[in-house]
């Protein structure tokens, strides 16, 4: 063993230099967020439950999203976060150091759950196992959590999340902003539309099926569990592997199971598409109307565009929530 290395080991032992564990050094470091406290009217309020995924590549976006939720909440201490992650130990430490007062749980998501069910899509990022983790929320979270808001990692809120939490689902399993002007047929392949046994799926819906973005959803987990919706989504993923009926990752199974039976939420709660299209990620403007949530769905993520000095005008809104050090 070289003398210099022996000397290094001796110094480490003698003065107890902290040695960073392998894999932790490449995680981003964030500033500690300020403490957010409840207002006087909050003790009577029930907890709000929010679910998100955590991944190193999107961690900067996740931290900004959490910060935005807390910053605009009237009752931030009444919010519980539920994070789904694969490298859960490292990510738990990051969240705890960034948000020391946050109430949260990190659940290990086993990628083997979706092994063999994922088909390649128009963008590699859509094929990551964590994109499918929202399908298994009801299995991973305790049964005591009967309602959840699911949020993607590429968004920020500019309004109190309690307003979204309090919407009436009117007996539906899922609530989300709908977009009925979208060309619904474009989300599925000719293999789907040319086969009556597939197209029959939409014929018996309570109303015309509309597109909705799965990055912002309010879900009744009790009804989800009771109705076996995870199995229904799994079924469509297995059909996709055999017949190739769509190209857009985890979104089409949700459309196949829920479109036409979604509780419509105001569009202000998902100003989506700010990341541009899935191929070139061009800059986009806000849709007309009020805004409560900005969502950089699409290829262009604000933290990547900011770092590359190619930011879009709206990326400056996201940057005000960026805690990256």
Image (spheres, rainbow, N blue to C red):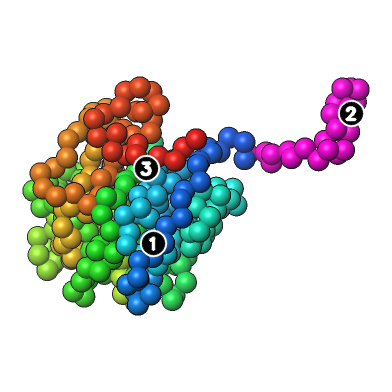
Mark 3 vs mark 2: give the one in front. Answer: 3
**Mark 2 Cα shell of 10 Å, populated few (<14), some (14-19), many (≥20):** few
Q: Nearer the viewer, residue 149 or 115?
A: 149
Q: Give yes or no for contact between labels 3 and 2 (Cβ–Cβ under 8 Å).
A: no
- Mark 2 element type: helix
Q: Does residue 154 sit above or below 263 in this rendering?
A: above
Q: Secondary structure under badge 3? A: loop
Q: Which residue is mark 3?
A: 321
| Tag shown at residue 64 | none
Q: Quadrant of residue 10?
A: top right
Which residues make up the magenta segment? Answer: 1-23
Residue indicated by mark 1: 76
- In this orientation, which residue lies closer to the viewer: 74 or 209? 74
Which residue matches tag 2?
6
> Does residue 10 show up magenta in the picture?
yes
State whether residue 122 appears in this view. Answer: no
First along the sequence among labels 3 and 2: 2
Q: Position of residue 43 (x, y in %)?
A: 38, 75
Q: Are marks 1 and 3 in contact (CB under 8 Å)?
A: no
- The quadrant of the picture occupied by the N terminus is top right
Q: Residue at x 40, y 49 (%)?
A: 67
251 versus 308 height, above or below:
below
Residue at disc 1, secondary structure: helix
Label 3 packing within 10 angstroms: few (<14), some (14-19), many (20+): many
Q: CA distance from mark 3 to mark 2?
A: 45 Å
Q: Is residue 63 visible?
A: yes
């Amino acid at each position: 063993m070289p003398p210099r290395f022996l000397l290094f080991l001796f110094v480490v032992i003698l003065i107890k230099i902290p040695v960073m564990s392998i894999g932790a050094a490449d995680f981003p470091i964030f500033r500690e967020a300020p403490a957010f406290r409840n207002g006087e009217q909050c003790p009577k309020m029930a907890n709000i439950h929010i679910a998100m995924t955590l991944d190193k590549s999107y961690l900067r976006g996740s931290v900004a999203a959490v910060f935005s939720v807390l910053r605009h909440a009237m009752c931030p201490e009444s919010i519980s976060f539920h994070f789904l992650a694969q490298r859960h130990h490292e990510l738990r430490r990051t969240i705890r150091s960034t948000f020391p007062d946050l109430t949260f749980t990190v659940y290990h998501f086993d990628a083997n759950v979706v092994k063999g069910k994922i088909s390649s899509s128009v963008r590699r990022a859509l094929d990551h196992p964590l994109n499918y983790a929202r399908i298994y929320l009801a299995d991973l979270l305790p049964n005591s959590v009967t309602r959840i808001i699911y949020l993607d990692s590429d968004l920020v809120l500019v309004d109190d999340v309690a307003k979204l939490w309090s919407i009436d689902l009117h007996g539906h399993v899922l609530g989300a902003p709908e977009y009925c002007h979208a060309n619904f047929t474009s989300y599925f392949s000719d293999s789907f539309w040319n086969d009556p046994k597939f197209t029959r799926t939409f014929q018996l819906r309570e109303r015309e099926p509309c597109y909705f973005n799965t990055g912002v959803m309010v879900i009744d987990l009790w009804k989800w569990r009771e109705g076996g919706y995870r199995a229904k989504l799994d079924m469509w993923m297995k059909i996709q592997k055999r017949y190739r009926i769509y190209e857009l990752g985890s979104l089409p199974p949700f459309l196949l199971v829920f479109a036409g039976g979604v509780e419509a939420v105001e569009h202000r709660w998902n100003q989506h598409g700010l990341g541009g299209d899935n191929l070139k990620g061009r800059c986009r403007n806000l849709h007309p109307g009020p805004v409560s949530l900005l969502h950089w769905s699409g290829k262009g993520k604000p933290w990547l565009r900011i770092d590359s000095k190619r930011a879009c005008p709206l990326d400056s809104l996201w940057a005000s929530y960026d805690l990256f050090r």
